[in-house]
């Protein structure tokens, strides 16, 4: 018994009833689908019709017809691999475009940034599908368009033969613009724009990354500058407080000079009076100051004599004579200073209990 022909398989699937019934309800639609599929199989005999459940984006499942097979995009199949396709006929076909998927194979992955095939799901989205319009578009025209697209930009990542690659590129570059159809020009334009967008996106990502790094650096500098400004503001406040304190001290000094006769002090700048004359001093205080100054002067001389003896700049006999003389004189000064202190204590009034 001979196997059923593709026409018999499609008719049986389209007009089946019960649980095997497909999601196509209109009889005219079914005959149109039959005609389109037979036309497809006649030009591309490597495809086989079948049915299957397809899950839509909203989660519902529909029973649809599909065509599975390979398209050859080059005469030399050894250098260019064929492209496996699964074409699902939408439940509203031909008013809605079919759903085309490139079968994903781990050995021949779809290269990234392909303009017409998603490398994760394998779904194809060519301009022919996007601008689908019945009756000018059908399954046969779709496959012809995909063969042309994939011959220009193959979806798989592979290493072609150099000779074939050079010939193909030369043939493409020699195509005269007047010989290119509207759809072919649109396909080429979409592909070029896609790769331009990919390149622009890559450069934009790099620019965004550089700008992000620059933004972080500016934030760091802003924090540093803000901290410096705050510190300078605090320093300005401290300087202002010190200036106010100095102004208060100046006012108190001016008031004191107004109360006390400040003419002697004011004469210091002119050099008319000595430093001692600028301050009031009685005879006893003057005597105590002179005695204390003489005592300290003798102490300095004794220290210098000790250093001279250590350096052997002075003989021992001379050192002894000078020390005795200075010690005698220092004794009298200290005795006089003690007498002056006792006199001062007697003159001070007793404090009340």
Image (tube, helix red, strand yellow):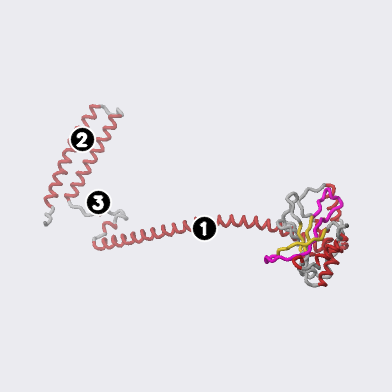
Q: Which residues make up the magenta segment?
A: 56-83
Camera-side residue of 341 and 32: 32
Query: Helix, strand or loop at disc 2?
Result: helix
Q: Residue at x 77, y 55 (%)?
A: 155
The residue that disc 2 covers is: 326
Q: Position of residue 335 (x, y in %)?
A: 15, 41
Camera-side residue of 305 and 278: 305
Q: Is residue 185 left or right of residue 109?
A: right
Query: Helix, strand or loop at disc 3?
Result: helix
Q: Quadrant of residue 86?
A: bottom right
* Residue 95 in view, yes or no: yes
**Which one is earlier in the sequence, the residue at label 3 or at label 2?**
3
Q: Are marks 1 and 2 in contact (CB under 8 Å)?
A: no
The residue that disc 1 covers is: 222
Q: Residue at x 47, y 57 (%)?
A: 227
Query: Helix, strand or loop at disc 1?
Result: helix
Rate crowding at label 3 as few (under 14), some (14 to 19) or many (20 or more) other CA atoms within 10 Å.
Answer: few
Rate crowding at label 2 as few (under 14), some (14 to 19) or many (20 or more) other CA atoms within 10 Å.
Answer: some
Q: Residue at x 25, y 51 (%)?
A: 276
The residue that disc 3 covers is: 276
């Amino acid at each position: 018994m001979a196997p059923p022909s593709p026409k018999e398989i499609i008719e049986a699937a389209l007009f089946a009833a019960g649980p095997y019934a497909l999601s196509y309800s209109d009889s005219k639609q079914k005959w149109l689908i039959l005609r389109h599929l037979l036309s497809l199989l006649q030009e591309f005999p490597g495809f086989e019709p079948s049915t299957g459940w397809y899950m839509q984006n909203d989660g519902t499942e529909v029973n649809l017809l599909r065509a599975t097979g390979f398209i050859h995009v080059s005469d030399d199949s050894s250098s260019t691999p064929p492209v496996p396709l699964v074409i699902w006929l939408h439940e509203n076909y031909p008013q809605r475009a079919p759903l085309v998927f490139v079968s994903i194979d781990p050995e021949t992955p779809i290269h990234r940034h392909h303009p017409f095939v998603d490398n994760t799901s394998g779904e194809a989205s060519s301009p022919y599908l996007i601008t689908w319009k019945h009756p000018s578009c059908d399954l046969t025209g779709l496959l012809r368009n995909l063969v042309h697209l994939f011959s220009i930009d193959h979806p798989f990542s592979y290493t072609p033969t150099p000779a074939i690659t050079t010939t193909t590129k030369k043939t493409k570059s020699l195509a005269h613009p007047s010989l290119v159809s509207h759809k072919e020009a649109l396909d080429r334009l979409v592909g070029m724009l896609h790769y331009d967008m990919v390149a622009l996106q890559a450069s934009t990502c790099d620019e965004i990354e550089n700008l992000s790094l620059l933004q972080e650096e500016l934030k760091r500098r802003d924090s540093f500058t803000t901290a410096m400004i705050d510190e300078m503001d605090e320093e300005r406040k401290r300087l202002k407080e010190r200036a106010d304190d100095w102004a208060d001290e100046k006012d108190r000094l001016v008031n004191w000079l107004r109360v006390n006769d400040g003419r002697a002090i004011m004469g210091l700048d002119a050099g008319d009076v000595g430093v001692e004359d600028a301050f009031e001093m009685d005879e006893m205080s003057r005597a105590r100051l002179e005695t204390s100054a003489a005592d300290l002067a003798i102490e300095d001389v004794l220290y210098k004599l000790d250093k001279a003896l250590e350096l052997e700049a002075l003989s021992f006999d001379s050192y002894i004579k000078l020390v005795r003389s200075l010690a005698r004189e220092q004794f009298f000064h200290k005795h006089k200073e003690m007498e002056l202190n006792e006199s001062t204590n007697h003159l001070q009034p007793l404090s009340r209990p």
